[in-house]
Amino acid sequence: MSMTILTVDDSRTMRDMLKVALMEAGYRVIQAVDGQHGLEVLEQETPHVIITDINMPKLDGFGFIENVRRDQRYLGIPILVLTTESSPEKKNLARRAGATGWIVKPFDSAKLVDVVRRVAA
Amino acid sequence: MDTMAAIRETFFQECEEQLGELEVGLNAMEEGVADSETVNAVFRAVHSIKGGAGAFKLDRLVRFAHTFETSLDLIRAGQLATSPTVMRTMLRSADLLADLVKASRSDHPVDEARVDAQIAELKALSEDVKEAPTEANAGGGGADGLDFQPVLLQLDDFGETEPQAARYAIKLIPAPDLYRKGNETVRLLRELSRMGEFRVECDTRHVPMLDALDPEGAYFGWRVELTTSEDEAAIHELFEFVVDDCELEIVVDRAGPAVAPEASAPAAAEPIAPLVAAPAFVAPVAPAPAEPIEAVAAATATVVEPDKAKVEAAKPDAAASLATIRVDLERVDRLINLVGELVINQAMLSQRVLEAGLARSSSVAAGLGALEQLTREIQEGVMAIRAQPVKPLFQRMSRIVRELTDATGKIVRLRTEGEATEVDRTVIERLADPLTHMIRNAVDHGVERPEVREAAGKPAQGEVKLSAAHRSGRIVIEVSDDGAGINRQRVREIAIKKELIAPDAQLTDGEIDNLLFMPGFSTAQTVSNISGRGVGMDVVKRSIQALGGRITIASRPGHGSIFSMSLPLTLAVLDGMVVKVADQTLVVPLTAIVETLRPKAGDVHALGVNARVISDRGGFAPLIDVGQELGYRRDAADPVGSVVLVVETEVSTRCALVVDAIHDQRQVVIKSLEANYRQVPGIAAATILGDGRVALILDIDTFVARTNRSGAGQESLLAAVG
């Protein structure tokens, strides 16, 4: 069974790019358009890895991660954040919220898949 | 690569949406709205554009978006106040961003100097802030001692490692809460094992007694011996995400045991005793056991069955953005055409059934009635596919107002209403130019200079209002200003000078106002380079008419003017009155008809030799015999006993069209005459009727104008307009 990855991003462009790259690598992709929607999708299905944007309406990436980490049902799911530049400040905030790692945008597909593979069980 | 091209297209579409959000947000901020949601939305819009642009290597766009974003971030952090000057810079930056997006999309060059100037302007704002002693970047810094620098350092330090196999001794002691962030030692070990020859030892000395043990904590330390040809940077990269949550030591061991320099990772918060050589447990090999992971998976086993439909139902608005598809416009148009044919066919069928003498109560007739209802619903549904809100169009106008205020020194604010009103896409596209012209006119000719306004007791800031609304099956768009109104005296003088009207012509205020729509008319004292571009309101009027719409003016001296456009929601169908003239069937657009009359003998008066008028609501309207005018018959029919349609032309002048009888009132599908035959003055298009015959659709304005040219009309103004 292929692994399922949840991508949470308000940008259609990013969602599309993630989906194409991950699907080509053999992953199954489910999507959410913001943090709040991400939590709702999680109610339906538990993915193997979560990739989330930070800047999003309604519930941003930090809030989303904190919510996921508080929930025992999602214990241990790796969460990768998408950051635009390798700003230490954003990464540290994400880490404090409970992110597993990060992917720097713009990413190339190979690098993205490599990072996902590294954190995926 | 096709997929990338498609995503690129998505990106640009999304850019348009983001630019719209940006504009709306910035305008709100300019008006003093400063809630964090608005500011965040503005920031997010630019941030999103930057993110996508980076993915497509649109470097120029990234560079500018980055500078813009930096300034917006300062506003977001409350370090940069949204003063009028700052907001103007932001709005101008948004304009430039829009231009850069457009240029990137079409691969067109941009004015680099303008980009540099705008970047300098934005940077100047940021620098002002930096000079003030605020803690710009303290926000999330090292509040809990975390610092990211190590990773960057590692990558640089070992740049020229040879691809020779080297032996590494790696010591890893996770901090107790490593697992909480979703990291797993087992995965790290798995990745290491894939890099080469691998031996691992586990140190269990730090496992606490059961009563002190946190079942979710990480207590095992690990010592790895790895022989690999990968360079040290690759090993460090594996630990990229955990370097701050563990004690890590990576020692290159090329020639036996050597004292390695201290790895660059910072020490974890609590000191951990060094690993001793006597491990409590030795794991022989690597392919890391899968059990722990499965245990985690089991712990999360409260998995609900995936059910996409449920997800979407639970989240209507988010689902909406995911549940859209993009369709070629061509396909939609094909569908619209087919539905048009369906409407015609359905009408034909109804007529045949009627002709066959079946009672209206018969089951066939009832079925047909239901079919008619369904057909109409399908038609409306299909039309709705092409409908779009006028919002993007309106947003473009605010930029025009902004540029004009910069150029004229007037202070004008654009207020918009009814942006969500939906109209056919083609109507929107073709409205852009006339609307732009009208907005320019409103600012340039309508609104007065600040000092003039103040002298007249008005606020220095003028207002131009742009509104859209649905009104009885049409869309009404109004452009109004609170300026001086139309200077009728001056309009009259110009019209006389240009010989558009006779010096002694008696014109009502409305007629004078309508002179603006005459070709070549310009009221500007000097032809400004803003609205005086050789096109006048006559061009605007023609564009609106070409869309099946009409435009009217209302003006009050000292209070401003209102230009009101009424347009059809779609260009594919038309509500028409089907009439009979000399055995021919014609369609008259319902929107043009004011009333229908059956004149009595006393109502008709002769005027000169050929002309006749009919008394209508206290005035007189010239009678035009449609059959004679179109050449269907030599002599005009007697209006008494015929049906008279009183129509209103674009210049608000009434005419009375004489026809033989009214057949029906219905929606007809418009078939272009130009595309199928050629343009005929007085005829707008054709349609196919229920009985399969072609009927011409009258174009009231050109028809009346044509009558005037042929000498039947009396109105000098009409003749001039024609």
Image: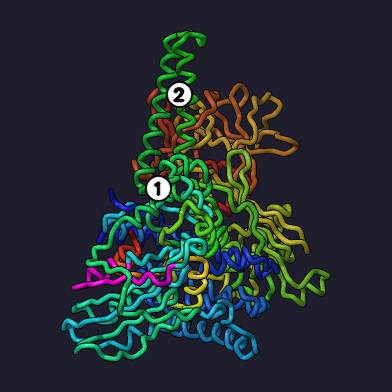
Q: Quick check: B497 above or below B700? A: below
Foreground residue among B39 and B113: B39
Residue B86 visible to the viewer: yes
Residue B325 is labelled as 1
**N-terminal label among 2 and 1:** 1
Residue B473 % position (x, y): 58, 39
User: What residue is rendered at 49% in x and 79% in y?
Assistant: B270
Q: Secondary structure at mark 2?
A: loop
Q: Quick check: B330 above or below B590? A: below
Residues in magenta? Answer: B188-207
Q: Chain of mark 2?
A: B
Residue B350 is labelled as none
Q: Amino acid at mark 2?
A: Asp
User: What residue is rendered at 17% in x and 81% in y?
Assistant: B165
Position of the N terminus of chain B by quadrant? bottom left
Residue B683 visible to the viewer: no
Q: Amino acid at mark 1?
A: Ile
Residue B705 % position (x, y): 54, 46
User: What residue is rendered at 59% in x and 26% in y?
Assistant: B643
Relative to B545, is B278 on the left or the right?
left
Q: Chain of mark 1?
A: B
Foreground residue among B213 and B644: B213
Is residue B201 covered in magenta?
yes
Foreground residue among B161 and B272: B272
Q: Give the Cα separation between the discs numbered 2 and 1.
A: 49 Å
Q: Which residue is mark 2?
A: B583
